[in-house]
Amino acid sequence: MNLRRDVFQAIADPTRRAILLLVSSHSMTAGAIAANFDTARPTVSKHLQILTECQLLEQQQNGREIHYHINAEKMKEVAEFIEPFRKMWDDRFNKLEDIMKNYKPKD
Amino acid sequence: MEPKTKIHAENGTQELIVTREFDLPLELLFKAYAEPEIVAQWMGTKVVKLENKKHGSYAFETSDPKGNVVFKANGTIHEYIPNQKITRTFEMENSPFDAQIEYLDFEKRTDTTSKLTMHIVYRSVALRDQMLQMPFAQGINMAHNRLQDIVNQLK
């Protein structure tokens, strides 16, 4: 459970979520990732380190370069983890929307 | 497709933000919060009390099919500005969880669409994370219960 919570905290940060989104399409070097953010390079490195430590990202050596790519299995776990809370509210709001679309004022 | 309901929960903070865009005019969205019988329908709970006014209070109660009360919650309304804003507390009864404060902002997008922003502040980071995890944990419990039901039927 502790590991899960770390993962959860990792994705709670907006920059780290943006990094995951970025890397999800194709693997990238740290430099290429950092180029997408206004944040200082060491800050991005720190985010990459956290994401790697909790196994959301994996490193791959390509010659002299290190590429980061998504660990799909771990991501799936996270999505499932936060999804029930979102789904709970989504279900309620869908219901609200349906009810109000058919709302007829009284009298 | 982007999900209509979004959760924003930043690392290490004791708050979270739920946003949702509705295909409803602002007035109709707000009405769904103003009228007790409508709240009951979409929240899936009995609305025991709902005094929508400054310093008013509310109480919800949910029973299982056998009539046992399984959920009780209540809170105080601190601010109530129709079609604009509701500030209230929310507390689950018979639970170890401290009350949370909720800021609900209602916005008009177009004549037929509106947006709700629900900003919830908890007493601590740990409590926020716990509440965020609760439906996940309940999902696991329900799966266990279903399994238990099946096992019981086998006996």
Image (cartoon, grey):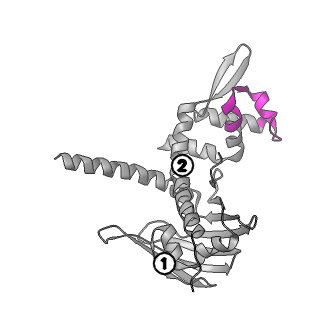
Compared with residue B94, is residue A37 higher up or lower down, i.e. above or below? Answer: above
What residue is shown at x 48% (from left), y 65% (from top)? B97
Q: Is residue B11 left or right of residue B150?
A: right
Q: Circle 1: is it few (<14), some (14-19), or many (20+) Cα within 10 Å?
A: some
What residue is shown at x 43% (from left), y 67% (from top)? B95
Q: Residue furthest top?
A: A63
Q: Position of residue B12 (x, y in %)?
A: 63, 52
> In terms of secondary structure, where does tag 1 sit?
strand
Q: What label does residue B59 carry, if any? A: 1
> In terms of secondary structure, where does tag 2 sit?
helix
Label 2 sits on what residue type?
Glu
Residue A29: quarter of image: top right
What residue is shown at x 57% (from left), y 45% (from top)? A8
Q: Position of residue B2 (x, y in %)?
A: 65, 47
Residue A23 is one of the magenta-drawn residues: yes
Q: Please indicate, yes or no, whether residue B34 appears anywhere in the rendered image.
A: yes
How many numbered markers are drawn?
Answer: 2
Residue B27: quarter of image: bottom right
Q: Please indicate, yes or no, whether residue B127 appears anywhere in the rendered image.
A: no
Q: Is residue B66 left or right of residue A46?
A: left
Label 1 sits on what residue type?
Ala
Compared with residue A81, is residue B37 higher up or lower down, i.e. above or below? Answer: below
Quarter of the image with the C terminus of chain A is: bottom right
The chain holding disc 2 is A
Residue A75: quarter of image: top right
Which range is magenta?
A: A21-42
The chain holding disc 1 is B
In the picture of the structure, the residue carrying the numbered disc 2 is A83
